Image (cartoon, coloured by chain):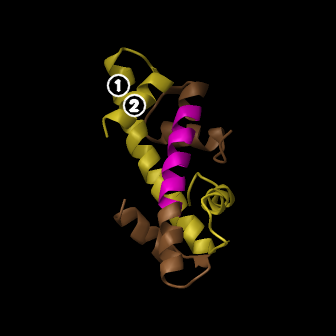
Chain colours: A brown, B yellow
């Protein structure tokens, strides 16, 4: 089970130009995006802690994306 | 506006260990994941067309993730 709704990921695939999208395709991409999200979030959390903060901010997220 | 719900992305960041998450952080990560999703989906759509299919399948998604 992913946190990301499969219907939202289906819309992203259609936005990218797909005519039709299998249910499994949307689920597969939801899983990939969630994994990538967890990886970025773990780094962002490290950066927040490094700055002595308990709150993860958008600056932490941006730094984490830059330092993948 | 992202297709991905900010609340779902907030849960992903908490799952990754964050105690607190700013609204902007969840929005920033939602935007990043959506961009990555569109990039993967565009490639997946190319691969589906290459195989003479109109339907994007999970195999197309997996091939697209491998060939980023």
Measured from the top left, where is residue A53 in percent x and y?
57, 83
> What is the crowding at mark 1: few (fewer than 14 residues within 10 Å), some, or many (at least 20)?
some
The residue lying toward the viewer, choosing from A64 and A26, is A64
> Real-space Cα distance between discs 1 and 2?
5 Å
SS at mark 2?
helix
Residue beneath the point at 46% across and 58% down:
B32
Across and down, in percent, residue B51 comes to 35, 15
* Element assignment for label 1: helix
In the rendered structure, the residue with mark 2 lies on which chain? B
Residue B56 appears in view = no
x and y, in percent, of residue B17 in the image = 62, 63
Q: Quadrant of residue B10?
A: bottom right
Q: Position of residue B18 (x, y in %)?
A: 62, 68
Question: Chain for mark 1?
Answer: B
Q: Quadrant of the C terminus of chain A?
A: bottom left
Give the number of marks. Answer: 2
Magenta stretch: helix, strand or loop mostly: helix
Q: Magenta region: which residues?
A: A27-41
Q: Is residue B23 above or below residue A16?
A: below
Residue, disc 1: B47
The residue identified by callout 2 is: B44
Q: Nearer the viewer, residue B52 or A27?
A: A27
Badge 1 and badge 2 both on one subunit: yes
* Of residues A55 and B40, the one drawn nearer to the viewer in this rendering: A55
The N terminus of chain A sits in image quarter: top right
């Amino acid at each position: 089970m992913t946190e990301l709704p499969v219907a939202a990921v289906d819309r992203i695939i259609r936005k990218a130009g797909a005519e039709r999208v299998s249910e499994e395709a949307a689920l597969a991409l939801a899983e990939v995006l969630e994994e990538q999200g967890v990886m970025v979030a773990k780094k962002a959390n490290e950066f927040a802690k490094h700055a002595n903060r308990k709150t993860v901010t958008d600056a932490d997220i941006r730094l984490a994306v830059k330092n993948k």
